Image (cartoon, grey):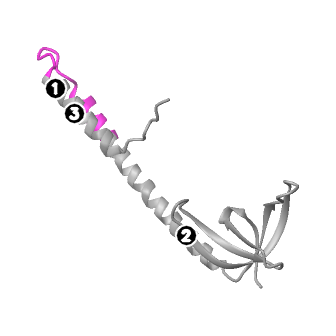
């Protein structure tokens, strides 16, 4: 099965322009293309490009916000659930956030948490169910 890659708005717009030029070169002079339709399609590509830029900006803001939140949890007591290796059931755990870091590979802010037994856990922000001051 072939994979389908998502094209950026600018790539789609360039492909459209190539197609448009080809259509203009080969159009019937007695039945020319509708200028309003071409202008409307170009405007839609412009809007798509702007939305793509906004999406990227929001992703950057969310990423920065998550990093700041992860850093604010250092030295806090957190509650989270972990799967028991032998039973496979979820167990509630509590521990202190020792550090926070950004994992470039997963593009996620992660926390290093140590429980009262000295066991260390690495978890994402979504895994935390309760935050308490020490």
Please say if 10 is above or below 35: below
Q: CA distance from mark 1 to mark 2?
A: 51 Å
Q: Is residue 63 left or right of residue 123?
A: left
Q: CA distance from mark 1 to mark 3?
A: 10 Å
Residue 51 counted in the magenta span: no
Q: Earlier in the sequence, mark 1 or mark 2?
A: 1
Q: Using the image as rendered, state which of residue 31 and residue 119 is in the foreground.
A: 119
User: Which mark's residue is nearer the viewer, 3 or 2?
Assistant: 2
Q: Secondary structure at mark 2?
A: strand
The residue segment tinted magenta is: 26-44
Image quadrant assignment for residue 44: top left
- Mark 2 Cα-neighbour bin, 10 Å: few <14, some 14–19, many ≥20: some
Give the percent coordinates (x, y) of residue 75. Answer: 70, 83
Please say if 61 is above or below 43: below
Image quadrant assignment for residue 46: top left
The residue at which mark 1 appears reads as 24
The residue at which mark 3 appears reads as 18
Q: Secondary structure at mark 1?
A: helix
């Amino acid at each position: 099965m072939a994979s389908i890659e998502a094209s950026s708005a600018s790539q789609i717009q360039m492909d459209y322009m190539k197609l448009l030029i080809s259509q203009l070169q080969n159009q019937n002079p007695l039945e020319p293309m509708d200028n309003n339709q071409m202008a409307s399609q170009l405007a839609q590509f412009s809007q798509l490009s702007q939305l793509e830029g906004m999406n990227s900006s929001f992703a950057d803001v969310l990423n920065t916000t998550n990093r700041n939140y992860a850093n604010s949890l250092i030295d806090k007591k957190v509650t989270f659930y972990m799967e028991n290796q032998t039973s496979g059931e979820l167990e509630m755990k509590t521990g202190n956030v020792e550090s926070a870091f950004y994992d470039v590979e997963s593009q996620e802010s992660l926390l290093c948490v140590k429980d009262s037994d000295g066991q260390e856990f690495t978890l994402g922000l979504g895994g935390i169910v309760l935050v308490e001051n020490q």
